Amino acid sequence: MARYEPKIVEPKWRAAWADAGVDRADESSRAPKYYALEMFPYPSGRLHVGHARNYAMGDVNARFRRARGFNVLHPMGWDAFGLPAENAAAERGVDPGEWTAGNIAAMRDELKRLGLAIDWSREFATCDPEYYGRQQALFLKLWAKGLAYRKEGVVNWDPVDMTVLANEQVIDGRGWRSDAPVERKKLTQWFLRITDYADELLDGLAGLEHWPDKVKLMQENWIGRSRGLELAFAFAGPAPAGFEAGVRVYTTRPDTLFGASFLAIAPDHPLAEEVARGAPAAAAFIARCRTGGTSEAAIESAEKLGFDTALQVTHPFDSTRQLPVWIANFVLMDYGTGAIFGCPAHDQRDLDFARKYGLPVTEVVLPPGEDPASFHVKLEAWTGPGRIFNSGFLDGRDIEAAKAAAIARAEAEGRGEGRTVYRLRDWGVSRQRGWGCPIPVIHCPACGIVPVPEADLPVRLPTGLDFAKPGNPLARHPTWKHVSCPQCGAAAERETDTFDTFVDSAWYFARFADPRAEAPIGPAASRWLPVDQYIGGIEHAVLHLLYARFMTRALRDEGLVSVDEPFAGLFTQGMVTHETYRRQTGEWLEPAAVRVVAEGTSRRAYDIASGEPVIIGDAEKMSKSKRNVVAPADIADTYGIDATRLFVLSDSPPDRDVQWTTAGVEGAWRLVNRIWAEFDAQPAEAVGPASDEAAAMALRRATHRTIKAVTEALETFRFNSAVARIHELVGQLRATPAPAAGSAVIAARAETLAVLARLVAPFAPHLAEECWARLGCEGLVAAAPWPDYDRDLAEDDEKVLPVQIDGKRRGEVRAPTGASEERVREIVLADPDIARRLEGLTVRKLIVVKDRIVNLVTG
RNA sequence: GGGGACGUGGCGGAACCGGUAGACGCAGCGGACUUAAAAUCCGCUUUCCGAACAGGAAGUGUGGGUUCGACCCCCACCGUCCCCACCA
């Protein structure tokens, strides 16, 4: 019997796959297409088992679909722009391009060792000029269409690093690298008009049947469509210059308009700025509002602050009432109109503000069961249902009817109109970064913003950028930005901002479909898109996945792609976690430095080097700082890649986190060896012929039942269940040893082994090839079709039916599969055990659930 | 503050459509092999009563409800996790 040697077996089969070209997508195939994709990695340089799990899932799916007869496209590339390369450049003085290229080379080798069925001929990195140049061309199309624009907006500004930060780069109000308090700063930035597609992006979610509800819900909330009324409040006295039309306010609660007791505008509202022009106190207040972050902590602790402008407006539905206009720190300029009316009785925030500044509180919604004469809001606003009162023409209506009536009246009087407002903002895509795709425009003092002519693309990044100083290295490069205007020839300057890296990943899946095409999106894209199954982390639920949906629609409207949605199916996988270990002194220890021993039901850990006790912490996401990262390469040396793949897919459902444990991989390694042992088995001493037929049939049934179960599990992404079923079949095989000649078991075993190799192939492809070859089968198992199951064999011919009396299990009977209710009834009533149990009882009802259970109800 | 998901043995988890709860794996226990250990192999392993592979009771976070029958459906509560968040 030969030992299974992954170190020898695995490289051998990887070479065989490469020679045979089995992993290449076939552009001439007539088979139905299947585009399998996992979110491409950032080339950090090191692969950890989290990557391995993600790509193993995609690989199982790709291999399974291929075996099912699909022409599979399964590509890989690199999301290669971004901050880590700049940090490496700043810290070590290396060139970010060279640093990235080195990382890609290292990670490509590691990914290849995972044995992934990937068409490597399509590989590219987003930092290749061949890629980002085409991205620039796409951007210019969007710009020509009016989908890209520049505007002044409030952004997170890091005063130390001197750059804009994305919201996710602001942690507790501070810059994630500099730790400096983030300022809100007005800057002119590039935006993409994602809000033009807000309705489509929202409504399109309903058609995404194969997306998790959770992600769809998150996108729905993120887009945040709400319907309401926008209306003008006219000034009671002379209007400030430019505000003769009054103050426009947006509300989703027009039913509560009669409860208004003040107006509040955002600190950066144009009216606030107008007021500040003549009032230093107002200006000082506005300046105060601009500091402070947007983080949870900052908002929670931020007091509601207001400044009374002394301006008064007239109530639109009651000209006898006047309302003061305040500037308030809790009003946001970029939602609605940047101005609200305050209705303290029915909005908690307005109530807090009113109580603080002594503003009136008028109840207008009467909760069910309350008396209009005595109902008063104290410290809690009433936001529940009720009937409108104290409200003129709205009195007596319910909330929904009152909203409609208020909108109708405002529209009839020309004061406002019903409006749909979105929480979604346009996508700010400029970054003051040196390692990104340059935005391909030129600023000319005479012509304004001039796009770089297509013939001049790509706008390449210069070499030799200085990353050591904070700020944008492109802006301070001595020559790069100085060009002549393509239109008038005068001296002009390049845009020095680069794109957010989410732009790079918003269309890469389309490039993979035709990666060497001259056009950014080649003709083959329409053949492959949409991606049939996309796999990646839940952290991209709104960011990347929303941007890609937007970009696909924008490109569709340019006639470049033929689909609305980029990803027909989405699966969000869980992380790989690991226990953490630290010394009493607090130092983190890596798993390899720790020995864990079981003591009864508890466990203790020791530092191998010093013998001192170690504290075992919770399983957490693998991170450098806690030193609990495990690299697949370390594991593969001992147990092979196949055991690693099996383990990360078997212990938890794929959408949940899985905890990495040595014992777990050892379990997978045992399975690998047990499988191999069955293929390598020599015939044993003769097994008694009496049991032959029965044993052979039992094995055949188990085999066909397993094909059915594994197929169904793979269709529904239940990899853990699929591996469990394989375990069971292997157990059955072990219980049915290979006999000497002349037994029915010989044929049954041969059938089972040929099936098993194919069922195992998606999970442990190297092992499966070795087994396939050992059987003497033709060709590669990687190219073999998926096994079919025999319906009759997948079902048992006899069922054990539990018999319940009054809902409690009291025995069981055997009945042929599919036996009629009548037949089962006879069997049950003829059973002596059941009869004894029923002594003294009257059976009132006998329920038979076909092939399942029998319940006798007595009474 | 708003929205959502999840609570099953010592652990990860399984259970199709309301029909034998605990598959499979890990850990543990017992045994075989071995001079010994590791590895490997065989068996046991929800809890409680019980000598029992005789029987029985309880049991899927808690309390109710619907049903012949509930991990699954409904109501309330407790707990954990995730997302969003001065969004008018």
Image (cartoon, coloured by chain):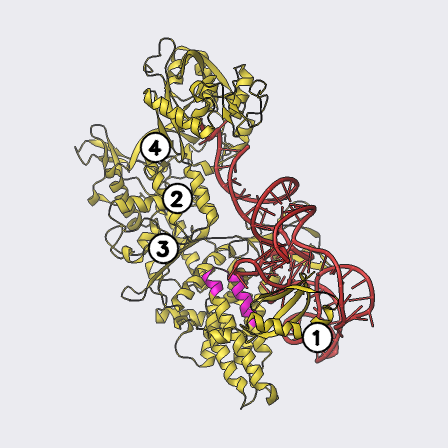
Q: CA distance from mark 1 to mark 2?
A: 66 Å
Q: Amino acid at mark 4?
A: Gln
Q: Secondary structure at mark 2?
A: helix
Residue, disc 1 = A832
Q: Amino acid at mark 3?
A: Val
Q: CA distance from mark 3 to mark 1?
A: 61 Å
Earlier in the chain: of badge 1 and badge 2, it is 2
Say which quadrant the C terminus of chain A sits in. Answer: bottom right
Q: Secondary structure at mark 4?
A: strand
- For the residues bearing labels 1 and 4, Cβ distance under 8 angstroms: no
Earlier in the chain: of badge 3 and badge 4, it is 4
Q: Secondary structure at mark 1?
A: helix
Residue, disc 2 = A546
Give the farthest residue toward the bottom. A742
From the viewer's perspective, tell me whether residue A33 is left or right of residue A331.
left
Earlier in the chain: of badge 3 and badge 1, it is 3
Residue, disc 3 = A531
- Which labelled disc corresponds to residue A189? 4
Q: CA distance from mark 4 to mark 2?
A: 20 Å
| Closest to the observer, A806 or A520 | A806
- For the residues bearing labels 4 and 2, Cβ distance under 8 angstroms: no
Q: Residues within 10 Å of mark 2 (few under 14, many from 20)?
A: some
Q: Secondary structure at mark 3?
A: loop
